[in-house]
Each structure stands twice: as C-alpha cells, then as structure tokens.
Image (tube, coloured by chain):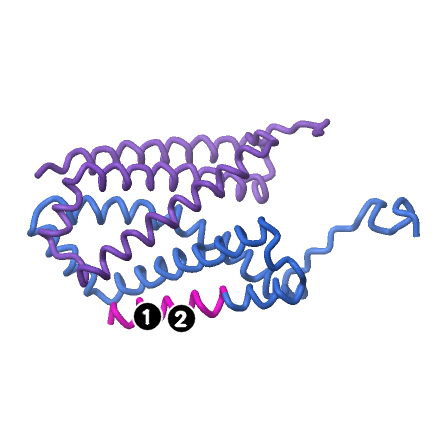
Chain colours: A blue, B purple
C-alpha cells in the first residue's frame, strides 16, 4: 500500500484504554525510567543534599543521621530511592548502548530490557540486605 | 526542519539530547568512583567522610556531579511536562518553578561543599 493510503496516514483515533494496553518489557523499562527519574527529582535530590549537609555538619549530626536510617520508614524510603537510582542507572546504560546501535534488534532489545529489570531488582535487594 | 514551533521551552535540537547523555556518563563515572571509595574503605565513618569533603579535588568532582545532575534533571522533568501537561500556561509555570528549585539546589550544593573546612 502506498504510504498515503495506509490507515495510519489518515486522522488517527486515539486509543488509550490503559488497562487494555499490554506494554512489552522494553516499554515497561522505559516508563519505569521515567517514573524513577521523577522520584529522584522530587524526593531524591532534596534528601541527598539534606543528608550530605547533615552528615558533614558535626560528628553528632552524622551519628543522628545514622540513627534516622534505623527507622523502618526511613529504610523503606531509602530502598525506594536506591531502586530508583539503580534502575535509572541500568536503564540509562541500556539507552546509551541503543544510541550507539548496540543491541537494537528486537530480540536483543527485549533481552537487555529483562536484564535491566532483573539486575536492578537484584542490586536493590543487596542494598536492602545491607539496610536490614 | 521544524516548521511549526510551539511554546514548549525546548530548543528543537541535538543539544539537549546530547547534554542528557554527556551528563549521564559523567554521573555514572562519579557514582562508580564513590562506590569504589566506599568499598575500598569498607564504608565511611565521620572522620574519613569529612576528610574527603575537605579535599579540593573531591569538592570539584562532587560539584561537577551535581551540576550534571541538575542539568540532567532539568531536561528530564521538562520532557515529562512536555508530554503530559498540555495547557501552555501551566506547563511554563511548572518549568519555571522547577528551574528555580534546581538553581536553589545548586546554591545549596555550593554552600555544603565550600562550607566544609578542615
């Protein structure tokens, strides 16, 4: 079919029935890249700065910060941020590789997206094990 | 070539795309470096942690990391706003607010890094 006659070239209906759209794994990695990035912007950066400031102020505040990390809720937040950073990092490396046309074939791209998901969760589990 | 420009705050170019990748590489390198220092020393106690932050090279590396992070965050949140926030007035207001917050973070970074003396 010539391009102009393809249904896609005409005014397209928007189909965004989110519960019915099945996202492939690379799509999941992509949206999680965005979600983790947003979390790091909203929560990660201010907490990082506040934490580093507190850790450097005095031996007492350093110890107090350590003490804060012992709270279960703080551990949960840290774990969430750890996953965000690790996932964003791993997915980012994958995107950089795709940029230089490494692994862009469908099968390879699917495989690498599964690797990103699994490795990120595994590394987050390591952080969790250290926290608890 | 872009013929219909919209007020999205983007520069329609390679620049932001490239910036996002260069800052990513810089941050990844710093992250692995700090992780390496942590593993090498078996974690940080206060004395070592503070000593690191009185070192000029460490300050500079940390500063560059934060500058990269703030640029990276700027491009990232702006992309999110451009995708999901359709009313231009709301979008530009959010972008302005985010830019101000990020600039504030830069100031805070400088205060922390150069407010730490031996």
Q: In the structure shown, which secondary structural element does the residue marked by tag 1 occupy?
A: helix
Q: Is residue B11 above or below residue A75?
A: above
Residue A54 image offset from top left, x and y in percent: 16, 47
Q: How many marks?
A: 2
Give the distance between the C-alpha atoms of the residues marked 1 and 2, in whole angstroms.
6 Å
Q: Residues within 10 Å of mark 2 (few under 14, many from 20)?
A: some
- Nearer the observer, B99 or A20: B99
Q: Is residue B106 above or below residue A38?
A: above
Q: What is the span of residues highlighted in magenta in the rendered image? A: A116-132
Tag 1: Cα neighbours inside 10 Å, few (<14), some, or many (≥20)? few
Mark 2 element type: helix
Which chain does the numbered disc 2 sit on? A
Does A69 appear in magenta?
no
Q: Residue at x 28, y 40 (%)?
A: B61
* Residue A124 is inside the magenta segment: yes
**Chain letter belonging to callout 1:** A
Q: Work out which quarter of the rendered image holds the N terminus of chain B and state it.
A: top right
Task: State the image coordinates of residue A40 (x, y, percent, origin top left).
Answer: 39, 50
Q: Position of residue A124 (x, y in %)?
A: 37, 66
Q: Which one is nearer the viewer's eye here, B61 or A75?
A: B61
Residue shown at 92% from the left, 52% from the top: A1
Q: Which mark is residue A126?
A: 1
Q: Position of residue A21 (x, y in %)?
A: 67, 63
Which quarter of the image is occupied by the C terminus of chain B? top left
Quick check: marks 1 and 2 in contact, CB under 8 Å? yes
Q: Which residue is mark 2?
A: A122
At 56% from the left and 62% from the top, the residue drawn is A28
Say whether residue A19 is left or right of residue B21: right
């Amino acid at each position: 079919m010539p391009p102009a006659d393809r249904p896609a070239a005409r005014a397209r209906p928007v189909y965004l029935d989110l519960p019915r759209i099945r996202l492939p794994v690379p799509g999941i990695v992509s949206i999680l890249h965005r979600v983790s990035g947003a979390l790091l912007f909203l929560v990660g950066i201010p907490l990082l700065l506040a934490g580093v400031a507190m850790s450097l102020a005095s031996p007492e505040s350093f110890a107090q910060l350590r003490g804060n990390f012992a709270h279960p809720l703080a551990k949960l937040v840290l774990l969430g941020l750890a996953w965000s950073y690790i996932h964003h990092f791993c997915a980012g490396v994958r995107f950089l590789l795709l940029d230089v046309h490494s692994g862009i074939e469908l099968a390879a791209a699917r495989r690498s997206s599964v690797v990103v998901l699994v490795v990120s969760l595994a590394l987050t589990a390591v952080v969790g094990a250290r926290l608890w | 070539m872009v013929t219909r420009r919209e007020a999205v705050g983007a520069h329609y170019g390679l620049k932001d795309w490239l910036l996002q990748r260069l800052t990513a590489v810089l941050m990844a390198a710093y992250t692995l470096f700090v992780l390496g220092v942590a593993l090498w020393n078996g974690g940080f106690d206060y004395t070592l942690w503070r000593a690191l932050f009185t070192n000029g090279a460490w300050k500079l590396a940390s500063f560059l990391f934060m500058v990269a992070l703030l640029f990276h965050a700027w491009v990232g949140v702006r992309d999110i706003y451009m995708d999901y926030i359709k009313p231009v007035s709301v979008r530009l207001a959010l972008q302005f607010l985010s830019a101000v917050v990020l600039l504030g973070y830069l100031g805070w970074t400088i205060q922390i890094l150069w407010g730490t003396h031996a």
